[in-house]
Amino acid sequence: MSGHSHWAGIRHKKALTDAKRASVFTKLGNMVTIAARYGGDPNMNFRLRLAIDTARGANMPKDRIEKAIKRGTGELKDGGVFEELVYEAYGPGQVALLIGTATDNRNRTFGEIRTLLTKNSGKIVAEGSVSFLFRPVGEIEISLTGKDPDESELSAIEAGAEDVEQEEESLFVYTKPEDLQTVKESLEKSGFQVLSANLSRLPLQKTTLSPEDTTSLDRLLEVLEDHQDVQTVWDNLET
């Protein structure tokens, strides 16, 4: 049941250039800022705790994380108010895309995302045209290093997982969105190393592409993920 977002893998990327690292920190800062709008205490705001964990996993400096939290709570007023927007689109070969963004200027973001899609064999579509092809889930990645995969799968299911998928040295655990926190905490108590945890979308049906369209999709995903406002991209490509 592959479906985890392309952006979710940012923690694993090696040897980031200074420019790329700055872009990553900006995106993560925006993620923390939006989460902090629901409360600045990570012990009371699970979403903020997840955002902070993700930022720390990418080695984002502590002072930048704290600044992002204060911006979200309103203690720091040094810019616009960020909001989350999800654009629905089709890419090459009619692959379905959900493009999650964090922006302080929705008109700018919409125009720029639309241009990137148009230049790369894609198009934005009306709300509801694509979202029904995905279901919201909680997604937890745990390390299988030193663990038995079969036993780990059973432990995840006992912890409340709806589904699991092994990928190399990781196990991706899928939950109901509302169960993400309890399953994550249960896995941690059982001795598993949680590499990431977030709310995600999984495709209900998948699309296969020709080699040519696959190459075009890879190019589109690259330019989308390089955009400063894009937080994550989900697709329904059969892998």
Image (cartoon, grey):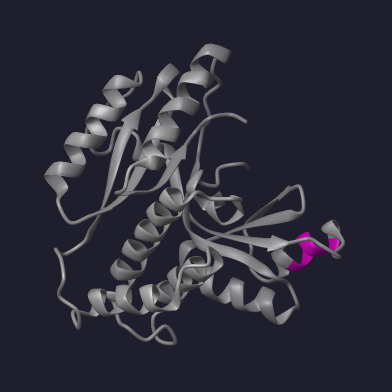
* In the depicted structure, whether residue 133 falls above or below residue 81: above
Evaluate whether residue 124 shows in this view. Answer: no
Question: Can you see residue 190?
Answer: yes
Q: Residue furthest front?
A: 18
Which image quarter holds the C terminus? top right
- Residue 82 inside the magenta-drawn segment: no
Count of numbered circles in the view: 0
At 68% from the left and 71% from the top, the residue drawn is 159
| Numbered range of the magenta stretch | 151-155
- 9 vs 21, left or right, is right
Q: Is residue 118 left or right of residue 234?
A: left
In the image, is 8 to the left or to the right of 188? Answer: left
* Residue 193 vs residue 157, the one in the foreground: 193
Tell me which corner region of the image, top left, top right, bottom left or bottom right, holds residue 157.
bottom right
Image x and y of residue 205, in percent:
51, 32
Residue at coordinates 23% horizontally, 28% vertically from top-left? 115
Question: x and y percent of residue 77 in the render?
Answer: 15, 75
Magenta stretch, main secondary structure, is helix
Q: Residue at x 53, y 50 (%)?
A: 16
Residue 178 in the image, given as x and y percentages of width and height: 46, 68
Q: Residue 165: percent from the left, percent from the top?
A: 69, 49
Closer to us: 208 or 37: 37
Instruction: Please report the residue visible at 41 percent of the width from the left and 72 percent of the height from the top.
Output: 47
Relative height, residue 215 to residue 20 (above, below):
above
Q: Quadrant of the N terminus?
A: top right
